[in-house]
Amino acid sequence: MKWRSEPPAILVSLYGWSAKDRQLNVKRFDQYAVHELAHGVWSCLAVGGPTDREARWWLWNEGFAHYLADTHLRAAYPSDAEVSAKWSAKRERARSQVARLVESRGEEILREIPRRWQEFDSELTGRRA
Ligand SMILES: [Zn+2]
């Protein structure tokens, strides 16, 4: 999450995490941090934010962050980091739609997704952008 009124920074919030959550997820902290950094990349590349299609924007934004953190950058993690693909079905569906786009068009498309997600979404759903 990037705060509007503060110097550029990436915050990895543990808000809502119990002590048990922190204990269970400490080895996945790198993955959480990379996920939030991926949202920062999205923000830098995107034109505009969610509009009247907020739910679809959320799917592309989260899918982009999960794909980058869980798949694309997986080899860059420290050897003791735990990188899991276990997320909710909605998040997995979001990651998978980005993965399918990358598989069909190549990795270069990753840079285009934050700007052109409505176009890709229309191709996928048949709905107009
Ligand atoms: Zn996210």
Image (spheres, rainbow, N blue to C red):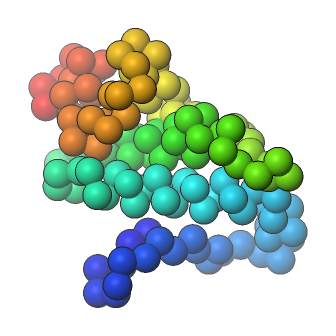
Q: Position of residue 62 (x, y in %)?
A: 45, 46
x 37%, y 39%: residue = 60
x 26%, y 51%: residue = 45
Looking at the image, the residue that sits furthest to the top is 104
Depth check: 76 or 102 in front? 76
Left or right: 50 in relation to 28: left
Looking at the image, the residue that sits furthest to the left is 128
Which quadrant holds the C terminus? top left
Which quadrant holds the N terminus? bottom left
Residue 27 placement: quadrant? bottom right
Left or right: 75 in relation to 114: right
Residue 84 placement: quadrant? top right
Count of labels in the image: 0
Looking at the image, the residue that sits furthest to the bottom is 6
Q: Is residue 8 visible?
A: yes
x 22%, y 56%: residue = 49
Q: Is residue 88 visible?
A: no
Q: Position of residue 72 (x, y in %)?
A: 56, 35
Instruction: Give the answer, above or below, for where 25 lies relative to 9.
Output: above
x 33%, y 28%: residue = 109
Instruction: Give the answer, above or below, for where 37 lies relative to 104.
Output: below
Residue 115 placement: quadrant? top left
Q: Position of residue 6 (x, y in %)?
A: 34, 87
Instruction: Give the answer, above or below, for where 124 lies relative to 17.
Output: above
Q: Position of residue 103 (x, y in %)?
A: 46, 16
